[in-house]
Image (cartoon, rainbow, N blue to C red):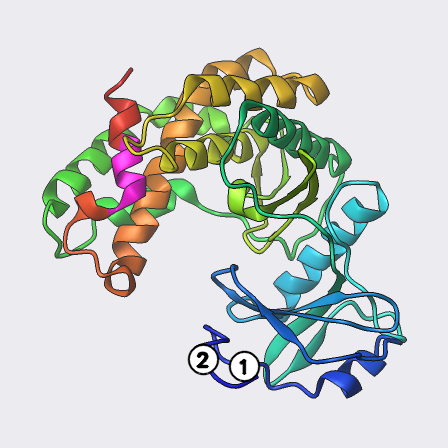
Amino acid sequence: MTGDHIWPKGTFGLAFPQFLERHGLEARGDVEPLLGGEDNRIGRIATDRGDVVIREYLNSGLDKVRAELDLVGHLARDGFPTPGPVPSLIGEPVAVVGGNPIAVFPFVPGDVPAAMTPDLARQCGTLLARMHAGTEDWTDERIPVIDRRGILEQAADSDVDLAGADRWRTETRAFLDRHAEDLALLDGLPSGPIHHDLHRQNLLVEDGDVTAVLDFDELNRGPLLIDLARCLHYLALEQPDRRLPAALAQAVIAGYEHVRPLRITELELLPLAFDLAGIVDAAGCIMWAAPRLGLTGVDDCHSWQAYLANREAR
């Protein structure tokens, strides 16, 4: 651990051998930084029981992390391909060090796929549906609920000072007005815990098969259809023209319906949910992340580009 040029989010303030002893593990070697995870500091270290990954949550509170780890542990025990937390010797899945929650996970072999293929897209849809089916009766008040219409109301009334902001505010208000009834219908669809961040870079793949779905840090409770729409939104973001590729979208939906067939109302509202995923993501980017990302105009926001490209394509 020699500095931020290796640890892009700073170094762990952690004595690894002593920390791992709490989990019944003996450290063997130094910790290696792992890239990825915008809101976390992640490292891999060898132990007497195999390699493990240590994850420090930089932006999530303890209650939210506990809720996430409880759900992830449940999924892992149910055979879902995600690493469940390694508990401490007293059964705790998370510790707090330096004010931040820290958890330990078994290392899972695999690589982030270089590109999304129809086969991987189908697997993503299947895994998303497996998650939804496997947590159908899961209730946990610690899991947050996102007020998507509230975010758009805030965006429409915001004083963001970027090039093109007036058009963005007008379009956001028009979206709310145009879809008021259907947005209300979304709230009545089947709901539960949703991953909310299922994209290529949160997958590990080996020999063509997904070995792990990672990063449940955006876990929230909402209409299951939103999770599917977010997956489609990420497919669009990866395209140079931000247009949703039909073949990949169809593969995701087919994989999903293989496990959990969509209701007629869900199928009817999927285009709206897809637009909602894009315009809400754009609102967050434009209102809260623009300075950090160096955006000078709303048209620099990739999610806004994707929303416009797909809305105007229909």
Q: Front-most of 14 and 219? A: 14
Residue 4's label in the rendered image is 2
Give the labeled residue for mark 1: 11
- Amino acid type at mark 2: Asp
- Amino acid type at mark 1: Thr
299 relative to 100, above or below:
above
Give the residue at the far top of this rendering.
264
Of the residues under marks 2 and 1, which one precedes in the sequence? 2
Q: Magenta includes 304?
A: yes
Question: Is disc 2 in contact with disc 1, using a CB cutoff of under 8 Å?
Answer: yes
Residue 176 appears left or right of 109: left
Task: Count the labels in the image.
Answer: 2
Q: Which residues are magenta?
A: 301-307
Q: Front-most of 196 and 49? A: 49
Q: What x and y, as percent, mark residue 286?
A: 26, 52
- Which residue is at 49% across, 76% downward? 6
Majority secondary structure of magenta residues: helix
Q: Quadrant of residue 289?
A: bottom left
Which quadrant holds the N terminus?
Answer: bottom right
Which quadrant holds the C terminus?
Answer: top left
Element at badge 2? loop
144 relative to 10, above or below:
above
Badge 1: residue crowd in 10 Å (few <14, some 14–19, many ≥20): some
Q: Quadrant of residue 243?
A: top left
- Which residue is at 73% across, 31% downward? 133
Q: What x and y, as percent, mark residue 184?
A: 44, 28
Q: Magenta includes 306?
A: yes
Element at badge 1? loop
Q: What x and y, as percent, mark residue 207?
A: 70, 36
